[in-house]
Image (cartoon, grey):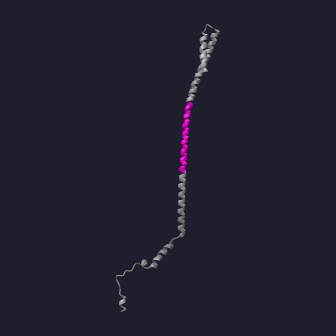
Amino acid sequence: ISGRKSIQCSSVKVAPRSIADPVRHNTDEDAWILDVNPEEDMQIIDQLLELQQHDQKFQEGQKDDLDRLDDMEGEIEAQEGRLLQLRDNLKVYHNMKDKYERLMGEVHSLESEKQALADELEKAQVDPTKGCSQAIKKKLQKVEEGLA
C-alpha cells in the first residue's frame, strides 16, 4: 500500500523557480532596490530642479525682454512723431527763409532805387533844367512808402 502513495502524476506542472518560490521573487526585488543609489537619485532630482529653475528664469527674462521691447517700440514711435514734427517745422522754416531772402532782395532793390531817385532829385533841384523835381519827388515818396 505504501507503494501506491508514491504515484507519479504527469499532469502536474511546476512553475519556474521565481514564480513558484516567493522567497526567490522577493530576492530579485531586493537586489534591484539594493542596486539603487539614493545619492545619485538626489543628484538627478537636484539637476532637474536646477533645470526647471533655469527654465523659469529664462521664461521670466523673455517676458521682461518682451515688455522692454514693447516699451522701446513705443519710444521709437514717439521719436518718429517728434522727427516728423521737426521735419514739418524745417519745411516751414525753409519757406520762411526763402520768403525773407526774397523780401530782403526787394528791400535792397528799393533802397538802391531810393538812393538813385534821391541823387536824381538833388541834381534836379540844383539844376532845374535837367528834370522835373515834382515827378522825382513822387517816385521817391512811393519808394519810401514801399520801404515802410
> Is residue 55 located in the magenta-colored stretch of the structure?
no
Residue found at the very far right of the displayed protein: 126
Per the rendered image, the range of residues in magenta is: 65-94
The quarter of the picture where residue 126 lies is top right
Relative height, residue 32 to residue 51 (above, below): below
Residue found at the very far left of the displayed protein: 10
Q: Please provide percent x and percent y for residue 7.
A: 35, 87
Which residue occupies the foreground of this view, 107 or 64?
64
- Total number of numbered discs in the rendering: 0
Q: Please provide percent x and percent y for residue 137.
A: 61, 13
> Is residue 80 located in the magenta-colored stretch of the structure?
yes
Relative height, residue 43 to residue 62 (above, below): below
Relative height, residue 35 to residue 58 (above, below): below
Q: Please provide percent x and percent y for residue 128.
A: 62, 8
Residue at the image point whose x is 58% and y is 23% from the top: 105
Residue at the image point whose x is 55% and y is 46% from the top: 72
Relative height, residue 77 to residue 146 (above, below): below
Residue found at the very far top of the displayed protein: 129
Residue at the image point whose x is 55% and y is 49% from the top: 68
The quarter of the picture where residue 120 lies is top right
Residue found at the very far bottom of the displayed protein: 1
Q: Please provide percent x and percent y for residue 148.
A: 61, 21
Decide whether the magenta segment is chiefly helix, strand or loop: helix
Residue at the image point whose x is 53% and y is 50% from the top: 66
